[in-house]
Amino acid sequence: MKQSRRDFLKKFPLAMSVPFTLAGTSIKVMGDNSLTRLAAASKSDRVLIILQMHGGNDGLNAVIPVDKYELYYNKRPNIAIPNKNRSRGFVSLDGTLPLEKQVGFHPDMLGMKSLYDHANLAVIQGVSYKKNNGSHFRGRDIWFMGGSADDYLQSGWLGRYLQGEYAPLKYPQDFPNSDMKDPLAIEMGSDLSLVFHQEGNIPTSIAINSPESFAELVEELDGFVDEQIDPRGLPPQGLQGSPYYKELEWILSLEDKTKDYAARLAEVYKKGDSMNGFNNYPKNYPYNAPKGSLTNPLSEQLKIISRLLAGGCQTKVFLVKIGGFDTHAEQVENYDTTMGSHAALLHHISSAMNAFQQDLRTRGLDDRVLTITTSEFGRRVTSNGSYGTDHGTAGPMFIFGKGVKPGIQGDAFKLTPNGHNLDMQYDYRVVYANIMRNWMLNEDDEATATAKLDKIFPNSEDPTKGIMTGGTADGETFFEMPIVSKVITGNGDFIGDRFSMEDPYPNPAKDKISITFYLNSSYLVNIDVYNNQGKKVKTLTSKEYTPGSHTIEADVSALETGTYICEYKCGFFKQAKKLVISK
C-alpha cells in the first residue's frame, strides 16, 4: 500500500524517539557522525567497544588495595569488602606485583579474575581529569568530547579523529556502498552520545522491535507519492541551499538508508546466529540484590555484537551501556557488604565480559576486538551513613581483549591531599590516545600518528597543537603507556610468570622427588603423575595453596622403572614435565 511523504514525515519523529532493536535490544544506528567514516577508510578490521558504566562507578569496592587495606576499611567500615581471609572476602589478583600495586577484586568479579589470568585484562588506576566537579552530565560530556574541564566542544574525540581524515565520504549519499554495507557505528540504547558527533553532522537513529518488523516497516514506506509537493521525492528546488532544504533532504534520504541497513543487519545477524559460538551468557545475579538489579543487561548487547561480527558486519565501533552506578544509598546490603546493587553490577560486567571473550575466541574473533570501560567519575573514599558513596573524582578503567598488555598501571590507593578522593594518576585522554595510537590508527609513521592524535585531542587555545606536540590547554601531554599491543604476539610470558612448575628433582628419581611450583593467587592445585598410556597412576597433591612459591616432596618408590608425565593444574593453567623413574 502506498502512502504519502506527508504521512511518513508525521510518523517520523516517533520513529526517531526510540532506538532500533535487534533481538529485543535497543540499538542506535549512527549515520553521518564521528564514526561513520571510520570503517570505510580503516586499514584494519579491528573493532573498539566502549562499555559505559553509567552513574559513576565506585572503583574502590571493585579494586581493593591490599597493602593499605586497614586504611581502606577505616574510611568506609559500613561498606568495605572483607579481607581475603574471610568468607566472600576480596579475591587476590596478582601476588607477583609490587606491594603498592597489589589489589583484590570484589568476590563477584571472578570472571574478570579469570580474564586477568588469561592475559586478557588490564587495569588502570586513578583515571580522571583536572578539576573534576563530580557532575553526571558535565562529566559524561567531558569524557566523550575529549577535552578539559573548561572546554565546551561540540564534537567527540572520535569525531575529531575523522574530521580531516575521511572528508570525501558523505552521509547519506555515499552510504551504504560496496566497500561498507554496514552502519559505521552502533550505540545500544536510546541516547546519542557526544563521543559520536562531529561539527555540523546529524547522527541518525531508527526504532523497531525486531529485524523482521523493521524490514516490514521500511517495505511499507516504499513508493511514496505526494504529487502536490515533491513528485520526484525531493525537497522543493526553490529552497535549495537553505538550512530547511538540507534538513528535509536528510530526512527524506532515510527511507532508502533504513531499508538498506535493515536488510543488511538482519542478514548478518541471522548468519552469525547460525554459526557456532559460545551461547552460555549469564542472565541473572545469583545472590541478594534489589529486584531491578538482578537481570544482566550486558549479556544480550554483547551477544548481538558477537553475532553481527561473526556474520560479517564491518561496523567499527560499538557503545554498550549498563546503568545504576549512582550508589548514594544502599550500595551494599546492611547485613553483608559483599552483596547488593553494586555487587550485582560488578557481577554483570565481569560475567558478561568473560562470556563475551569466550564467544569471540570460539568464533575466531578475539584478536580483532578491544573493549574499554568509561564512567563519568569515581566515588568518594569515605562512605556515607546510608550504606553508600557520594560523587568523587578518579577511578579505575578496565581494558579487555587479546590485544591488551595485561597488568595493573598505577598505585592501588593513592589519595588526594585531603584524603577524600582517589588522586588522579592518569588523564583519561592519555589513556584514550594510547588506545587510538596502538589499536585503531594502525600508523607506522610517527609523524602521521602524531598529527592524527593532535586532531583528536587538540589544545583548545591553539588548535594547531595537541596532546602530542604541545600539550592540551590544561597542560596534559601524551606519554606511552603499556596497555595495548599494536601487534598481537601472545602473552605466554605474562602467564608463565604467574603460574609455573619446575622440573621434578632428582630426575631420574628412585624413591622420592621434590617439585616446586608457583601461583599468583589462591587456587586449588593438582599435580598428578601419568604413565605413557595416559593413565593417572599417582596424585602428588590436591589442595588449595596460597599465592607464592611452594615445594612438595613425594614418595614415588611404588612406581615402576619408566618414563612418566607430571601434570600441574592450577585453575585454567596446565603444565607438564617429564619424570624418569630408574630403579
Image (cartoon, rainbow, N blue to C red):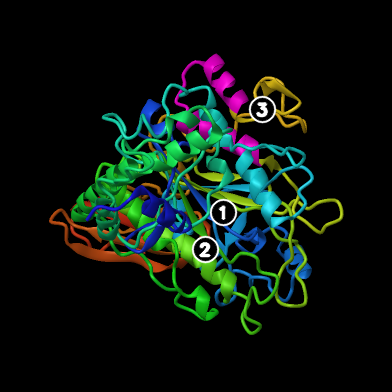
Q: Is residue 131 above or below residue 488?
A: below
* Residue linked to disc 3: 458
| Disc sitting over residue 95 in the figure | 1
- Residue positioned 54% across, 38% down in the render: 483
Q: Residue 303 versus residue 402: which sits nearer the camera?
A: 303
Mark 2 or 3: the one toward you: 3
Q: CA gap, disc 1 to disc 3?
A: 40 Å
- Category of crowding for the residue at label 3, using alpha-carbon neighbours closer than 10 angstroms: few (below 14), some (14–19), many (at least 20): many
464 with respect to 541 (left or right): right
* Residue linked to disc 2: 546
Asked whether the beta carbons under mark 2 and mark 3 sit within 8 Å of each other, the answer is: no
Q: Residue furthest bottom?
A: 335
- Category of crowding for the residue at label 1, using alpha-carbon neighbours closer than 10 angstroms: few (below 14), some (14–19), many (at least 20): many
Kind of element beneath mark 1: loop
Q: Position of residue 539 (x, y in %)?
A: 30, 66
Q: Residue 247 versus residue 438: which sits nearer the camera?
A: 247
Q: Residue 267 versus residue 455: which sits nearer the camera?
A: 267
531 with respect to 573 (left or right): left
Q: Is residue 343 above or below residue 137?
A: below
Kind of element beneath mark 2: loop
Q: Amino acid at mark 2?
A: Thr
